[in-house]
Image (spheres, rainbow, N blue to C red):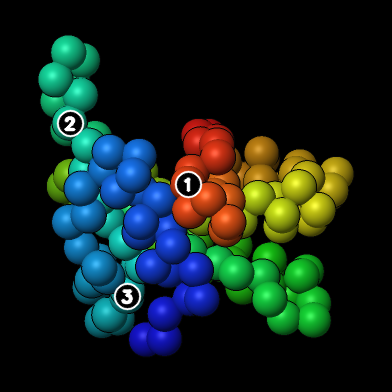
Amino acid sequence: MARDLFHQLVREALEADGWIITHDPLILKAGGLRLEIDLAAEQVFVAQRGPESIAVEVKSFLSKSKLNDFYLAKGQYDVYREVLNKDINPRKLYLAVDNDIYQSFLQKSLIAEILESDAISLLVFDVLTKRVVEWITR
C-alpha cells in the first residue's frame, strides 16, 4: 500500500510527543481482508493506568476535491475502527491531518458536525515544525 505524503512526518511527530512506534504499518486481518493502518504506537503512563495504545491513519487531503478526500478518509476510518473495536486489545484510532486542512476544511460546519456525530478522533500536526498541535479525542 502506498504511504501518505505526511507518513514519515507524523511518525516523527508522534515520537517527539513521547510515543513508541510499534507497527509501521499495523496489519489487520478481518473478514477475509488484509487491512493496513499507517501507524500504531504506545505510550506508558506509569502514574495512571499503564500503556495506552493507538492506531493512526494519515491523510493529506491533496486532491482537487477536499470533499472527496474526506469521503475516502471517513470510509477508511469507519472500516478500521470497526475492525479495531473487535480486537481483544482495541486501540484508539486517530485520523492524522495537518493543521492547515484542519483549520481551512475540517472545521467547516457540516464537516465538523459529521466528525463530532461520528466520533472521529483527530491528531492535528504541523508540517513545518513536525509536531503534534492538538489531540481531539471523541
Instruction: Give the mark nearest the N terminus, 1 or 2.
Output: 2
Q: Are marks 1 and 3 in contact (CB under 8 Å)?
A: no
Distance Cα–Cα, label 1 vs label 3: 27 Å
Amino acid type, callout 3: Leu
Circle on res. 44:
2
Please report the residue visible at 16 percent of the width from the left and 47 percent of the height from the top. 88
In the displayed structure, does residue 60 sit left or right of residue 5?
right
- Pick out the residue farthest to the front: 129
Q: Nearer the viewer, residue 103 or 79?
A: 103
Amino acid type, callout 1: Arg
Circle on res. 35:
3
Residue 80 position (above or below residue 91): below
Residue 116 position (above or below residue 124): above
- Give the crowd class for mark 2: few <14, some 14-19, many >=20 residues within 10 Å: some
Instruction: Give the mark nearest the N terminus, 1 or 3.
Output: 3
* SS state under label 1: strand
Circle on res. 56:
none
Residue 114 position in % (x across, y down): 71, 48
Circle on res. 131:
1
Amino acid type, callout 2: Val
In the displayed structure, does residue 85 sit left or right of residue 112?
left
Quarter of the rendering occupied by the N terminus: bottom left
Q: Nearer the viewer, residue 33 or 2?
A: 2
Please report the residue visible at 17 percent of the width from the left and 31 percent of the height from the top. 44
Q: Quadrant of residue 24?
A: bottom left
Residue 77 position in % (x across, y down): 50, 61
